[in-house]
Image: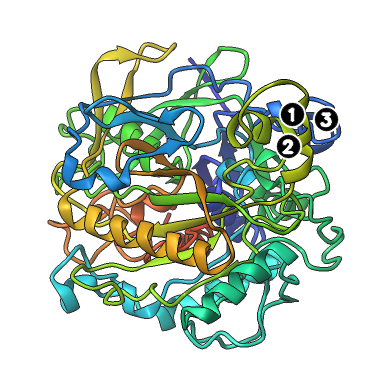
């Protein structure tokens, strides 16, 4: 095994957490090595929006077909919740079986992580969602306050170039958004009108997408295809924001195609070295002063559990037994229909507006945990003629073609994302049988939705239908949700932060309670996920705080 050049800090993973912590360290002169399992994408070459095949391509992940995780047995479905089945008016039930099926964990391996295909929502936590345990005896309280986190939110917003409204009464702010909010598309104005009829608010969303030129990047052209990768660089993904700035310091080295296989724990409560396989297939090791794990809420617990040895017999940082526990997934509902008017709903930004009315943890009757509603047409992939031809318009031949031309651009979809609370049946483990190409056990996703989650999901579905109807959609042609299919982008909680070492994995700075030079900076540290908010901005803010702590320790020679 070859030794790699030495650095002060090794960051494993280059998504929202890894990128932000790398920049926080590098700008203050700390030498950082970022190890990323995926490739370095070239937006101009790899994102295919300029080709005729754009609609048939999703994000160009070359390793998408490799098996990266497995699923434990999923729950049986019940007639009690049959109104939550996913369906399409042409193809019928998406899952005709009597058991929930495994869909996809929408995680991107690559320099920039999942921010490469996210739709840009840049949300702060609602302060009331940070104290679920003390207020409602659910989940866990955050070990830090909103006020402590607020300066780091501002810093992250400035780096990304977040565009948002002038007024933000739900999230106290010490400074305005860096950029003005995007104009709401014509299609989204239908939602605004519909919500007014229902006595609801529909406001401009805060997004990490440039509403005007900023920091050397152009403003958005409103193609709505953020999820396929942004070739213009106006979307604030980590590769063109935090990591670009980190590289410019000369103190940050990024190595893509590197698969970290284990962290070697020593007898002195320190991580001695990081072992990995590089892009050429060579086994290497590096012995930094500190290690930051930022692989996401599925791969981070996997790596920690794989790193057991005589000093960490139950897995690294797992003294509490909480590594992999408290898994929170995306509780999702989407509904799509045709509007009687031409809307050109294929243009705009995917989530230009939002309804915050039900975001508070006590906003939904008879259940703890809120939700948000926003436009879903882009994320339902109703942007091109192929989707209309296969999912919207029945028939074949000349009449089919004429109808397709008539209705194209009239699809209007709404999405709802809700709180996901920890339960004992939802966790990440090591698969007992299946292994990756390096011979290591895959992560196994175990997911269960208790009645409390399904009650919240039922509210989300009913309210989504009401909003669509009030917005002018008379007939829905497709609905999909979490009840019968696991499909998650926002996952969190598997290395929860807290003050009590017996109930958490890391402290409020992301530092292991035991291992003095081990930190975690990704969604796995989140004690709660904020009633459906986009988590990337919160991950970045927390990572900036972690980086500040590491930099302070470096200055005091405590690493």
| Residue underneath mark 3 | 45
Q: Nearer the viewer, residue 22 or 62?
A: 62
Quick one: label 3, few (<14), some, or many (20+) residues within 10 Å? Answer: few
Residue 510, compared with residue 125, is above or below; it is above
**Does the residue at mark 2 contact the one at mark 1 (Cβ under 8 Å)?**
yes
- Please give the name of the residue rendered at 57% of the width and 41% of the height, measured from the top-left corner: 113
Q: Earlier in the sequence, mark 2 or mark 3?
A: 3
Calculate the distance from the C-alpha at mark 2 to the C-alpha at mark 3: 35 Å
Residue 520 appearing in the image: no
Q: Is residue 390 left or right of residue 527?
A: right
- Please give the name of the residue rendered at 33% of the width and 79% of the height, measured from the top-left corner: 128
Calculate the distance from the C-alpha at mark 3 to the C-alpha at mark 1: 38 Å
* Residue 404, image x, y percentages: 73, 36
Q: Nearer the viewer, mark 3 or mark 1?
A: 1
Q: Is residue 67 left or right of residue 398?
A: left
Q: Nearer the viewer, residue 327 or 111?
A: 327
Kind of element beneath mark 2: helix
Quick one: label 1, few (<14), some, or many (20+) residues within 10 Å? Answer: few
Q: Earlier in the sequence, mark 3 or mark 1?
A: 3
Q: Nearer the viewer, mark 2 or mark 3?
A: 2
Question: Residue 65 — which label?
Answer: none
| Residue underneath mark 1 | 399
Residue 211 appearing in the image: yes
Kind of element beneath mark 1: helix
| Number of marks in picture | 3
- Please give the name of the residue rendered at 39% of the width and 65% of the height, measured from the top-left corner: 463
* Residue 71, image x, y percentages: 29, 26
């Amino acid at each position: 095994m070859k030794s790699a050049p030495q650095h002060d800090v090794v960051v494993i993973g280059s998504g929202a957490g890894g990128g932000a912590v790398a920049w926080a360290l590098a700008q203050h002169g700390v030498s950082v090595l970022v190890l990323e399992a995926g490739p370095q994408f070239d937006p101009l070459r790899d994102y295919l929006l300029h080709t005729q095949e754009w609609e048939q391509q999703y994000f160009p992940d070359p390793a998408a077909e490799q098996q990266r995780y497995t699923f434990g047995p999923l729950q049986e479905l019940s007639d009690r919740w049959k109104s939550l089945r996913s369906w399409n008016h042409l193809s019928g039930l998406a899952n005709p079986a009597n058991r929930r099926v495994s869909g996809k964990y929408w995680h991107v391996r690559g320099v920039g992580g999942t921010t490469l295909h996210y739709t840009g929502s840049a949300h702060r936590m609602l302060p009331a969602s940070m104290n679920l345990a003390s207020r409602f005896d659910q989940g866990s309280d955050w070990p830090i306050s909103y006020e402590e986190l607020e300066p780091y939110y501002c810093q992250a917003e400035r780096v990304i170039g977040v565009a948002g409204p002038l007024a933000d009464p739900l999230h106290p702010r010490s400074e305005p958004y860096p950029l003005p909010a995007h104009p709401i598309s014509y299609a989204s104005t239908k939602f605004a009108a519909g919500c007014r009829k229902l006595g609801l608010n529909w406001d401009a969303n805060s997004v990490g997408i440039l509403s005007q030129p900023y920091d050397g990047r152009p403003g958005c052209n409103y193609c709505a295809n953020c999820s396929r990768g942004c070739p213009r660089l106006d979307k604030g993904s980590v590769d063109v924001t935090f990591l670009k700035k980190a590289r410019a310091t000369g103190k940050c080295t990024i190595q893509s195609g590197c698969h970290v296989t284990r962290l070697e724990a020593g007898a002195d409560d320190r991580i001695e070295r990081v072992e990995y396989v590089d892009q050429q297939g060579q086994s290497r090791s590096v012995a930094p002063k500190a290690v930051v794990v930022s692989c996401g809420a599925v791969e981070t617990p996997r790596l920690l559990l794989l790193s057991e040895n005589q000093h960490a017999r139950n897995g690294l940082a797992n003294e509490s037994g909480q590594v992999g526990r408290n898994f929170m997934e995306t509780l999702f509902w989407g509904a799509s229909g045709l509007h009687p008017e031409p809307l050109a709903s294929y243009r705009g930004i995917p989530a230009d507006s939002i309804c915050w009315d039900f975001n508070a943890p006590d906003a939904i009757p008879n259940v703890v945990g809120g939700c948000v509603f926003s436009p879903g047409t882009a994320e339902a992939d109703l942007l091109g003629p192929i989707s209309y031809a296969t999912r919207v318009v029945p028939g074949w031949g000349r009449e089919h073609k004429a109808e397709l031309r008539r209705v194209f651009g009239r699809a209007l979809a709404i999405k709802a994302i809700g709180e996901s609370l920890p339960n004992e049946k939802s966790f990440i483990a090591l698969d007992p049988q299946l292994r990756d190409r390096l011979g290591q056990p895959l992560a196994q996703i175990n997911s269960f939705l208790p009645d409390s989650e399904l009650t919240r999901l039922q509210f989300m579905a009913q309210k989504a239908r009401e909003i669509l109807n009030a917005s002018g959609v008379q007939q829905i042609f497709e609905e999909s949700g979490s009840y019968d299919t696991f499909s998650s982008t926002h996952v969190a909680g598997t290395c929860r932060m807290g003050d009590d070492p017996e109930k958490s994995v890391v402290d409020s700075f992301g530092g292991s309670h035991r291992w003095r030079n081990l930190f975690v900076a990704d969604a796995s540290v989140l004690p709660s996920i904020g009633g459906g908010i986009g988590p990337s901005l919160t991950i970045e803010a927390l990572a900036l705080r972690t980086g500040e702590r590491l930099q302070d320790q470096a200055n005091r020679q405590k690493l």
